[in-house]
Image (tube, grey):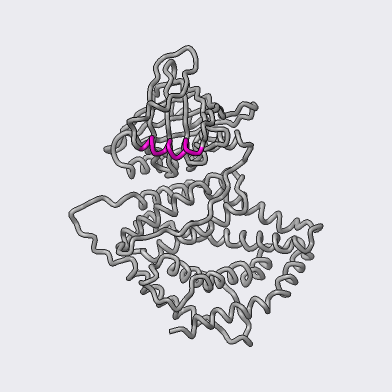
Amino acid sequence: MYEVELKLQIPQHKKLTVKKAIQMLSPEHTSLHAQYLDTENFLFAENFAALRLRKEDNDWVQTLKAGKNALARYENEINLGVSDTVPKVDLSLYKSDKTAQKILSTILKETKAQPLQVKFETIVERDFKLVQHENTEVEICLDIGTVGNSKDVTQEIYELEFELKKGKTDELIHLVQDWVKKYHIWLDVRSKAERGNLLARNMTTNIAKTFEVTALEKKASGKQALQNIIASYTQQLLPNIAVISDQIADAKHFFSTQLIIENICHTLDLLIEYIPNTISENKQILLDLNNQLIDFTVLHYLKHETLQSVEAYQFKNIDRVLDKYRLEFSKTVRSPAFTCLILELMKLGLPLEKTKQKDESPRFEKILTKRYKLLKQQLAQTVQPENEECKPDAQTLMLISQFQYCLNHSHKNLLPLQVDKDYFSEVYDLYKNHLLSKQVVLQHVKAIKTEQFFFLGWISGREDKILKRYYKLMNKLSIEE
């Protein structure tokens, strides 16, 4: 009832090579023509579900899919047999499936008897082969075709799918990593249903989700916390990677991605002794991307804030820098090194195997509290008298960010309550979006000097007020015991 699979996109210059590689496997072939149905206001899509009628060679198959997990989703396929015409959807076929009934009841109670409509179709030629990898069976599929709606708006499909048929998920991931290194394919969690729904709604991409802090059990061990945090944040990251790779992400996707990657980095740093070498040796990839995303965030914030006062001005220099970053981000998330690292994080986020050996890692709250106290001392030492020049740097921002991480992931009764989460989040915002802005402008906005002078002047005009607020908050931190 659950499918475990990974979808990957293929670079243009590798498509023929990948097609030949699939042919070398002596694959089977099938023609797939599917209709996706939904209510008028897309209630299936809104509830992360899809209802599909698909002709597979001669047979028609009705499928209900659901779930937000990028790796494993609920799926129930029912073969309707051979028919010369498109059969009608029959939801009563799921009456004995409790999971299906729960999904459908949530959707149907909102429909008020709305009829189901065909929203879009997919036409795909699939080559597939069941391969053995270590002790695992994986079906590798190459799908080539189109997804489109009734308005003749179509999009090409040319993707690989690796579906676990038998065995362990980590071995599936290992096989995918081999293909990533060889063919430079990259992760893309967007299903055909998601692509079709966007076309049907005349949308380019889904709205970016706000970063959500993972809730942890009070008595979670270090290893348990590591697995839960990485699993949660990787799942939040994957949809953003997909739209960034296609260069269709909006600013909110980048802001969310920065916070997710930053929190992943803090988790890896805090729990370094439980991290495999395959991750710790490549963590710099995430750190570099995080720093670039911070610069992007600062520049975008500056442009947005200043446009309110100079609407007629076109910031050609800063626009070029932001566009260059978008292109670089796309290249990074498509790269084999980044893709393999994300796959390693997905492995790390898999549920811990039950063993007779006792988990002797200390409680996460104990590890967090120790780091919290150390960071508080280090931050207090960064506070300077108001008459001395504040020299913002990335290291201080990292300390502030790590401290915010401790506050976000703690239980209220586990850490001292001297520090108010709300006020310290303001410290983080002041430092990242304001105090670092001059440094970022000097580094990146160089080509048009008048534009650079404008931003530096705008920053200077607000600097005193922001510094006073920053000092007030930080002094409150430093004097608390």
Is residue 185 visible in the rendered structure shown here?
A: yes
Q: Main secondary structure of the magenta part?
A: helix
Q: Residue furthest front?
A: 112
Residue at point 59% right, 31% down? Answer: 155
Which quarter of the image is occupied by the N terminus?
top left
User: Which of the 4 quarters of the picture holds residue 457?
Assistant: bottom right
User: In terms of depth relative to the viewer, which is nearer, 400 or 90?
Assistant: 90
Which quarter of the image is occupied by the C terminus?
bottom left
Q: Position of residue 469 (x, y in %)?
A: 61, 78
Is residue 158 visible in the rendered structure shown here?
A: no
Residue at point 46% right, 69% down? Answer: 402
Residue at point 81% right, 57% down? Answer: 312
Q: Residue furthest right?
A: 312
User: In terms of depth relative to the viewer, which is nearer, 445 or 81?
Assistant: 81
Q: Position of residue 12 (x, y in %)?
A: 56, 35
In the rendered structure, which segment of residues is drawn in magenta? 99-110
